[in-house]
Image: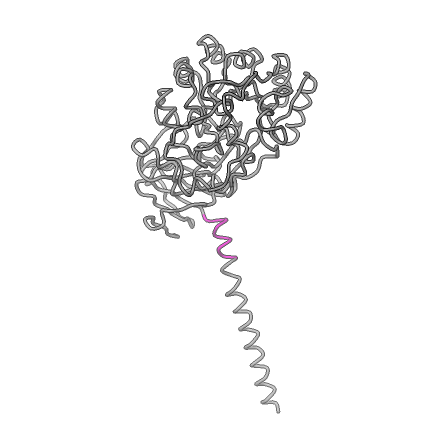
């Protein structure tokens, strides 16, 4: 009898022990992997890096806790703690690019598509307003909210007003609108100063946009582009009268209110009158390079006021004044910032290498200068410290592409490594990389 009871106890203990072992086998690897993802630093080696200011060789990047911890020569890293080493060979490492003129909300463009194609931060303009979010394994999204415009002003006649535009008629109404947008999370205030009718402009005439080889399965979903397609197919004959503009007094009120709340104002400008109002009212940024030719003296005045222009040259490449304005602006020392207008037809849903090529061609910028315009300079415009750089303390938003960008700039559209906030999103170097845990 005693022997029988003893045997039952042994069997029960064995079952309990097996159960615990099974539980440990099932759950412990999950805990271990989660801990590794959170705590193990990442050390990146590559033939060259662009750190937000200049291109360097023999420089590696250490990522810890979602930030850049250190950069230095490969030989300077004598790691003693656990670290994941990824050797990217002949690749180029650089900060994730920043898109300052996007319409993701407007066109329901998937944020993960944009992130996987090298844009780690966007500023979404002319759509729903919300608090900033993302940047920790997802696309960082900042918004302006709807465009402030005149009653019946652009873009209301062609796109409507819902979540796209807010019409104001008085200075007080304008100030109240600015405050409301900022309270809801707007990082910048966008206004429209657009009478319409510019030759080659997608919003006022048929836009036979040249094909640059952008479209491929990853960049171009087979979904209909509804509202924004109306911008490109709006016949010139339909523009029978000019759209009304905000008065200079109302724009001054908008700028004043925005500045009181530490926000900049960006203006959709395409021709001389809009440019004159923006300059006189102290607007901080032009959301596009103007489509019509702008007199040199007006551009000189804008440069003297430290106005920044977001390029969108690829989208507006058929405009009659685009090359003249870009060349003159650059010759005057004006600052250009990268923006390609993601969600516009024929623009990649990620980095637009053609935009960078136009900046180099029309503005005479060197490669490092256009990369700065899309990284560190854009981060400064967003007032986010160190964003767009690979300096210690910067958010670990990083991409890497095969080869030397001096010879293969198009590769930027197809990054083989994408990291957001220290989290690896894309890694196509796996077959060639060397990874180890020391």
Give coordinates of residue 228: x percent, y percent.
52, 31
Does the stretch in magenta take in 23?
A: no
- Farthest residue in the bottom direction? 1
Quarter of the image containing the N terminus? bottom right
Q: Is residue 419 left or right of residue 19?
A: left
Residue at the spot x=37%, y=52% of the render? 436
Q: Is residue 86 above or below residue 174?
A: below
Q: Is residue 366 above or below residue 13?
A: above
Indicate how the structure is coloured in the image.
one colour
Residue at the spot x=43%, y=20% of the render? 319
Which quadrant of the figure has residue 187?
top right
Pick the residue in front: 275 or 329: 275
Pick the residue in front: 279 or 82: 279
The boundaries of the magenta stretch are 31-40
Q: Is residue 221 left or right of residue 177?
A: left
Pick the residue in front: 111 or 419: 111
Give coordinates of residue 122: x percent, y percent.
51, 33
Residue at the spot x=41%, y=30% of the render? 52
Pick the residue in front: 200 or 37: 200
Which quadrant of the figure has residue 369?
top left
Give coordinates of residue 112: x percent, y percent.
49, 42
- Secondary structure mostly seen in magenta is helix
Q: Is residue 180 left or right of residue 283?
A: right
Residue at the spot x=51%, y=18% of the render? 197
Give coordinates of residue 115: x percent, y percent.
47, 40
- Farthest residue in the front direction? 237
Which quadrant of the figure has residue 56?
top left
């Amino acid at each position: 009898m005693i022997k029988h009871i003893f045997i039952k106890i042994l069997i029960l203990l064995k079952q309990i022990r097996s159960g615990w072992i099974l539980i440990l086998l099932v759950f412990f690897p999950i805990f271990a992997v989660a801990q590794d993802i959170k705590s193990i630093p990442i050390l990146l080696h590559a033939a060259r890096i662009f750190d937000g200011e200049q291109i360097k060789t023999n420089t590696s990047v250490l990522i810890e806790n979602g930030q850049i911890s250190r950069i230095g020569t490969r030989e300077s890293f004598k790691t003693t703690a656990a670290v994941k080493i990824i050797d990217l060979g002949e690749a180029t490492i650089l900060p994730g690019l920043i898109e300052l003129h996007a319409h993701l909300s407007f066109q329901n463009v998937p944020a993960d598509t944009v992130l996987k194609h090298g844009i780690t931060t966007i500023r979404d303009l002319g759509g729903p307003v919300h608090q900033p979010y993302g940047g920790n394994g997802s696309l960082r999204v900042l918004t302006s909210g709807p465009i402030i415009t005149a009653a019946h002003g652009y873009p209301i006649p062609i796109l409507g007003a819902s979540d796209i535009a807010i019409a104001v008629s008085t200075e007080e109404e304008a100030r109240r609108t600015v405050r409301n947008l900022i309270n809801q999370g707007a990082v910048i205030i966008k206004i429209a100063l657009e009478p319409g009718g510019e030759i080659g402009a997608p919003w006022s005439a048929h836009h036979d946009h040249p094909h640059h080889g952008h479209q491929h399965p990853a960049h171009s979903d087979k979904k209909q582009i509804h509202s924004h397609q109306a911008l490109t197919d709006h016949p010139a004959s339909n523009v029978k009268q000019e759209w009304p503009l905000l008065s200079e007094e109302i724009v001054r009120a908008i700028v004043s209110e925005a500045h009181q709340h530490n926000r900049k104002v960006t203006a959709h400008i395409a021709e001389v009158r809009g440019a004159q109002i923006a300059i006189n009212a102290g607007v901080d940024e032009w959301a596009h390079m103007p489509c019509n030719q702008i007199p040199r003296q007006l551009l000189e005045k804008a440069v003297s006021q430290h106005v920044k222009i977001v390029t969108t040259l690829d989208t507006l490449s058929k405009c009659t004044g685009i090359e003249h304005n870009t060349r003159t602006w650059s010759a005057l020392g004006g600052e250009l910032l990268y923006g390609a207008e993601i969600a516009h037809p024929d623009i990649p849903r990620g980095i637009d290498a053609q935009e960078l090529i136009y900046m180099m061609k029309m503005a005479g910028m060197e490669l490092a200068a256009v990369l700065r315009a899309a990284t560190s300079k854009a981060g400064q415009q967003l007032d986010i410290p160190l964003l767009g750089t690979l300096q210690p303390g910067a958010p670990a938003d990083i991409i890497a592409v095969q080869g030397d960008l001096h010879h293969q700039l198009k590769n930027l559209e197809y990054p083989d490594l994408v990291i957001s906030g220290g989290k690896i999103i894309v890694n196509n170097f796996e077959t060639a990389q060397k990874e180890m845990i020391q």
